[in-house]
Image: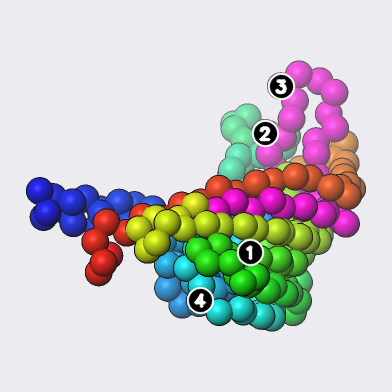
Amino acid sequence: MKYFTTWAALLGSALLSTVALADSGYYGGTFGARASGRGGAFTAKADDVTAISFNPAGLAKLDASLFQIGNEASHNSYSFTRAPTYDYRIPDPTTGAAPLVAFGKVTSSTPWQMLLPMLGATSRLGLENWGFGLAAFAPPGIGKEEFPLGGGQRYMMISRDAIILTYAASAAWKYRDVFGIGATAEWIHVPRLNYSLVVDGTPFAKAANPVSAPLDILATTKGSSLFTFNAILGTWYRPVPFL
């Protein structure tokens, strides 16, 4: 029974030790330097201020007050080449077959991102078996991308410009060193979220073209959100002292 408990705990830790983040869209990368150094396998460990986001229950394991400040700078040089496709708008006058069109490589013209700040603090506030935390941070991601208007990606994305900020408050409690629970309340503030792509404005059914069309329109959406609520619940369990 002892060995079964140990192996079950190891398997559970392996399954639950990483944070699920989107691989596309705005989010990418890992929040915090220590979590990045562990390849994102930080949920079970969660032993610094970033536990507020990874697993708030980890705050109850911290024996001292912590103050943490950080920033992430990155160079996101994204390039890709769209697969060739047929241009049905200009069929061959002899055979009537649509020609195969190849696309050149496109690269984001805004690769540098210098500011993804993080500021936070944790404390037990003099209470045994408790932990509390406050933090303000920009979640990991690529806030700005811009591709050429006439590139092969014209019907997917021309540009994205996003600013996302999170303000969080957490509380955690543990029972000795056996298990702990915690919760984080987040206020997500989006001052700016702009997105542009080209759409085929052809009004006739089955007349849309995958390469370009005379009625192509540059469509841009702009939005913002003062307040969006999110909550994170976390726990940890230590079945034996060395796990």
Coloration of the structure image = rainbow
Residue at image x 55%, y 53%?
182
- Could you say where residue 106 lies in the image, as x and y percent from the top left? 67, 64
Instruction: Read off the residue under disc 4.
Output: 63
Q: Three-letter amino acid code at disc 4?
A: Asp
Part of the protein shown in magenta:
182-211
What residue sits 50% from the left and 63% below the top? 129
Q: Residue 88, can we see it? A: yes
Spatial CA distance of label 4 from label 1 is 12 Å
Give coordinates of residue 234: x percent, y percent: 51, 51
Residue 175 x/y as whole percent: 42, 56
> Which of pointers 4 and 1 lies earlier in the amino acid sequence?
4
Specify the amino acid type for callout 3. Lys
- Viewer-side label of 3, 1: 1
Confirm whether the magenta stretch covers residue 95: no
The residue pinned by badge 3 equals 206
Find out whether the residues at labels 2 and 4 contact each other: C-beta distance under 8 Å: no
Looking at the image, can residue 29 be seen?
no
The spot of residue 211 in percent (x, y) is: 70, 43
Amino acid at pointer 1? Phe
Name the N-terminal-most of marks 2 and 1. 2
- Left or right of 205 on screen, residue 33: left
User: Which residue corresponds to mark 2?
Assistant: 88
Magenta-drawn stretch, dominant element (helix, strand or loop): strand
Please report whichever mark, 3 or 2, sits nearer to the chain's N-terminal start.
2
Question: How far, Cα to Cα, is label 2 from label 1?
Answer: 62 Å
Between marks 3 and 1, how big is the CA–CA gap?
58 Å
Dot 3 falls on a residue whose secondary structure is loop
